[in-house]
Amino acid sequence: MAFGQEGEVAGHAPTQQGPCFAEAPRRTLAPMQYTHLGRSGLSVSRLVLGTMNFGMEAEEADSHAIMDAAHDAGINFFDTANRYGGKTGPGGTESIIGRWFAQGGGRRERTVLATKLYGDMPFGERDSWPNGGKLSALNIRHALDASLRRLQTDHVDLYQFHHVDRDTPWDEIWQAMEVAVQQGKVLYAGSSNFAGWHLATAQEAARKRAYTGLVSEQSLYNLIERSIELEVIPAAQHNGIGIIPWSPLHGGLLGGVLKKERDSSRRTAGRAKETLEADREQIERYEDLADELGQEPGDVALAWLLHQPAVTGPIIGPRTREQLDAAIRALDLRLDADVLARLDAIFPGHRTAPEDYAW
């Protein structure tokens, strides 16, 4: 995937290698837009900076420049995870962010910092060890403290469960989170890759404890993949949980992939290639519509997400200033009812279950 699974960006492929941000001129862009995260009072940018590429496709200096450019553009919401790191190993991305915070200049204070836990983390020379993953109270404590050390901060604004843990009861999870909140180490809780009934169960358990529970859910959501419209989005809206879509361009397939193939600037592979072949006719119609509108396909894909009432903001993963500017451009793209209907005709969505498949 060109721009990473959890954060892609509209616009053209990079035309140069190495540090792309260092010499990029500052550009005059429309003001950033902000919204509340779910039902909370926390104000976050409508674009979320994804950091999964840091340490994998972006070197540390480039990663720092990307974060500075994001702040310059008004993006205050940054997302990471304790497992991210690529060639630097698990935890590497958090360490890169931590060294950026350590430079000062209000970098930490201006950032709404979100990280995640669930996957096993190495213990010394061992790749895994009992209680080194998932959502037990012990791992929540250990994983949080380790993330704080790497991030060089005393708290995480949004601590997210990267996947549902079917082995740990919610009373245990929420008790551990309540302790972390009381200690000042966490402010809000979020989830990722949860089903609708997982959200409902989590919130009911939190209510019984008089605890806030979840304020956000990260889900795979874009024009091609709309399964969460069945139950996740209705459950999120009912419980005041903001949706944060990952892979907004579906591995680059919504970013003008056919045009790039014709220009020989991109070749798909693996699952993205299989999806392209299966959906080629729809993607052709989609790119033709974007051309008719005079817009880049990736801008239209991001704008469509920003038009969805349940969406807080999609995760983007820019590697150049041009890509960052392209994502910001989507904030001002207004899609009228006719265009939204035409997009629905190309990529049909879902009604809320059970009406989608029954009555």
Image (tube, rainbow, N blue to C red):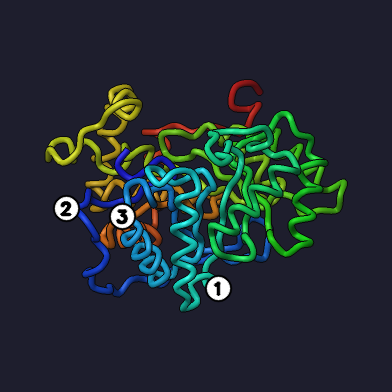
Distance (Cα) linking label 1 and label 2? 33 Å
Q: Which mark is residue 319?
A: 3
What residue lies at 48% left-to-right and 40% top-to-bottom?
221
Mark 2, other Cα within 10 Å: few <14 / some 14–19 / many ≥20: few
Name the amino acid type tagged 3: Arg
* Residue 15 badge: 2
Quarter holding the N terminus is top left
In percent of width and height, residue 294 lies at 23, 53
Of labels 1 and 2, earlier in sequence is 2
Q: Identify which amino acid the numbered label 1 is placed on.
A: Glu
The mark closer to the camera, 1 or 2, is 1
Q: Which residue is mark 1?
A: 109
Mark 3 is surrounded, within 10 Å at the Cα level, by few (under 14), some (14 to 19) or many (20 or more) other residues, namely many
Side (left or right) of 17 relative to 164: left
Q: Earlier in the sequence, mark 3 or mark 2?
A: 2
SS category of the residue bearing label 1? loop
Q: Is residue 1 left or right of residue 189?
A: left
Q: Tell whether label 2 touches label 1 (CB within 8 Å).
A: no
Relative side of 206 to 232, left or right: right
Residue situated in front as seen by the camera: 13 or 147: 147
Q: Quadrant of residue 89?
A: top left
Query: Regarding mark 3 in the picture, which secondary structure is present there?
Result: loop
**Disc 3 to disc 2, C-alpha distance:** 11 Å
In the image, what residue occupies the spot 40% across and 60% down?
Answer: 331
Assign the C terminus to one quadrant of the image: top right
